[in-house]
Image (cartoon, rainbow, N blue to C red):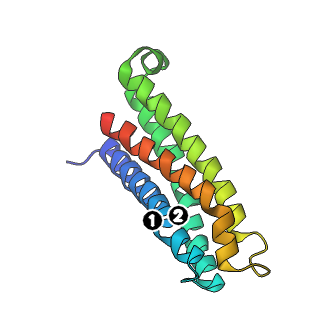
Amino acid sequence: MTTMLDVVMTTHTVFAALWTGGTLVVAGAIIPAARSDLLSTKGLTLIARRFWYLTVASVLLLLFSGGHLAGTLYTAESLQATGRGNLVLTMVGLWLVLAVVLFFGFRRLTDNQSETSAVAAATRARPWFLGASGVSIALLVVAGLL
């Protein structure tokens, strides 16, 4: 029988995978395509908006599901004193960094979108999405260690 904890853990894992995987796709395929003038401004805006929705949903779901998991599976002492607890705290820190880096990346991608080309917007956003992809990989490594 499936417990509530299993449902929360599955939801947490699915959205974490979608968010980090989506970040890698945007950084590795969408931004380069836009910089090569293979995407129109309208196409880039559509993809950015959809990925923004995934990002907001993931941030909220990961906050609540991760908080529930941490509160159920760990104590304040075990978070600070055990290897697994330290990995959980590392994951929280990386999750926060990813959210902030993506926020600034989206701002560079969508600011003045009607006035600039997709090439210019993607070029401005590229460093932020490359950083976000590095953080995503670090999150996946930490998740694998857990």
Q: Is residue 116 above or below residue 108?
A: below
Of residue 26 and residue 20, the one placed in the foreground of this image is: 26
Residue 38 on image: x %, y %: 54, 83
Report crowding for label 2: few under 14, some 14 to 19, many 20 or more residues within 10 A (C-alpha): some
Residue identified by numbered label 2:
54
Q: Is residue 125 above or below residue 45?
A: above
Q: Secondary structure at mark 2?
A: helix
- Quarter containing the C terminus: top left
Report crowding for label 1: few under 14, some 14 to 19, many 20 or more residues within 10 A (C-alpha): some
Q: Is residue 54 left or right of residue 49?
A: left
Q: Which mark is residue 39?
A: none
Residue identified by numbered label 1:
25
Residue 48 on image: x %, y %: 59, 71
Residue 14 on image: x %, y %: 37, 55
Q: CA distance from mark 1 to mark 2?
A: 13 Å
Residue 34 can be seen, yes or no: yes
Q: Residue at x 45, y 59 (%)?
A: 24
